Amino acid sequence: MISHLINVSFEDLLRELSPQVLGSVVRRFHDFSAAEDAVQEASLSAALKWPVQGIPENPRAWLTQVAFRRMVDHIRSDSARRRHENKAALETNFSVESTTVESESAADDTLVLLFMCCHEVLTPASAIALTLRAVGGLNTKQIANAFLVPEATMAQRIVRAKQSIRSSGIPFQLPSSDERDQRLRNVLHILYLIFNEGYTSSVGPELQRDDLSREAIRLTRILHKLQPGDPEVAGLLALMLLTDARRGARTNADGELVPLAQQSRELWDQTKIREGIELISTTLPKGSVGPYQLQAAIAAVHDESASSSETDWPQILALYDLLKRMSDNPMVKLNHAIAAAMVHGMATGLALLDELSDDSRLVNHYRLDAVRAHFLERAGNEREAVVYYRLAAGKTASLPERNYLLTQAARLDTNT
């Protein structure tokens, strides 16, 4: 244990262990909010003592013991829960050595915590916040900064999420086999949303938020370790790695957006690409192909292309044909239109966009206008392309994307 920790910072170690400890405390005491407070106090105690005294032989057991004692103190301070106090005090009379038995359930506890934080009783926004807080180890201020909302707003969102869990009576246990597939889809969806917000920020001055993308990948790695046989978990991890590999080429020295076709592929992270391709290549032949695996396969085709002009668009279109059949996601349909345009021409792409213009989920989204502008430009209709580039710019809250779209409009306006 100690040899594994030599090169790990205290902050990283506490971040890794906190969800495991929180899971143990919630499982024992069935009080999410109080358990979270107890784990935070234990982590603070560790941050003060470990740099001086050294990391204990079993740091998870140390944190669990301190958190359990904080919970007993909390129960004892509440006279209305005197009966619970006696039971909890008896249950919690253990030594560090006995706590090592608890560590055997660390994997299950972390998995249950993920399932709980991504439960369907929560809105996606609340689930994201709670997942980043409880499982990711980010504090409220960090999460608020990531989503550009006041810290008080994010704190209220987290409190409401915990209240929803409490009032719903969700038990702290792994769901039944019948429930697990549906619950796992919720977990994957929340991790996917966190990654997407980090890779292309929906608001603010930065195109990317590296901390969110890294956290999404870290959490998905944990989930893959806990659920190694699930092909969609592997597919999502592969998708994240293959997409995140392009991060370094997505902006220039001035922080301006660089579209995929113009990116310097020498800047792509080949280590992530190799790992992602190995994951998806191992997973796809096993059958039971899902949407995350298909998206990862599409990302792999892009990443394996030596240049933009050598991209195998017919293969990408075939994959999007499959994906569109199993998903009603409007962005899948929009990306399918892009692939169809690259294979069959801009007229085909524009016709597909006309069909999508009636979809209420897309009508006010900037990407529909941005893609139409691109198709019109490639079709030679630069005057109309200017109109749609400007319409798209007016609909996005991302400053880098807005600047890019306005730059395209100004470039074409000068030409015409």
Image (cartoon, rainbow, N blue to C red):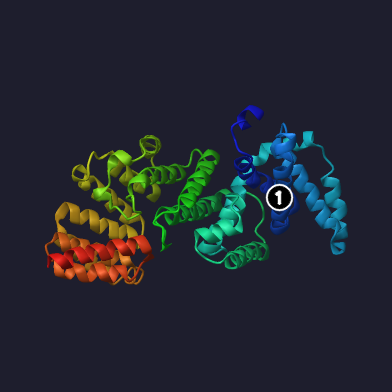
Query: Residue 269 sits in which quadrant?
Result: top left
The answer to whether residue 352 of the structure is visible from this angle is: no
Q: Secondary structure at mark 1?
A: helix
Q: Say if 105 sits above or below 138 in the image.
A: above
Residue at screen point 20% across, 47% down: 314
Residue 335 coordinates in the image, percent (x, y):
28, 56
Residue 193 coordinates in the image, percent (x, y):
45, 56
Q: Say if 296 sits above or below 52 in the image.
A: below
Tell me the residue that label 1 is attached to.
39
Q: Nearer the viewer, residue 170 or 263?
A: 263
Q: Nearer the viewer, residue 57 or 350?
A: 57
Residue at screen point 48% across, 45% down: 217
Q: Nearer the viewer, residue 238 or 250?
A: 250
Dot 1 crowding, Cα within 10 Å, few <14, some 14–19, many 20+: many
Residue 132 coordinates in the image, percent (x, y):
56, 54
Q: Quadrant of the C terminus?
A: bottom left
The reply, left or right, for residue 381 in relation to residue 370 is left
Spot the residue most to the front. 254
The answer to whether residue 39 of the structure is visible from this angle is: yes
Q: Quadrant of the N terminus?
A: top right
The reply, left or right, for residue 25 in relation to residue 281 is right
Amino acid at circle 1: Val
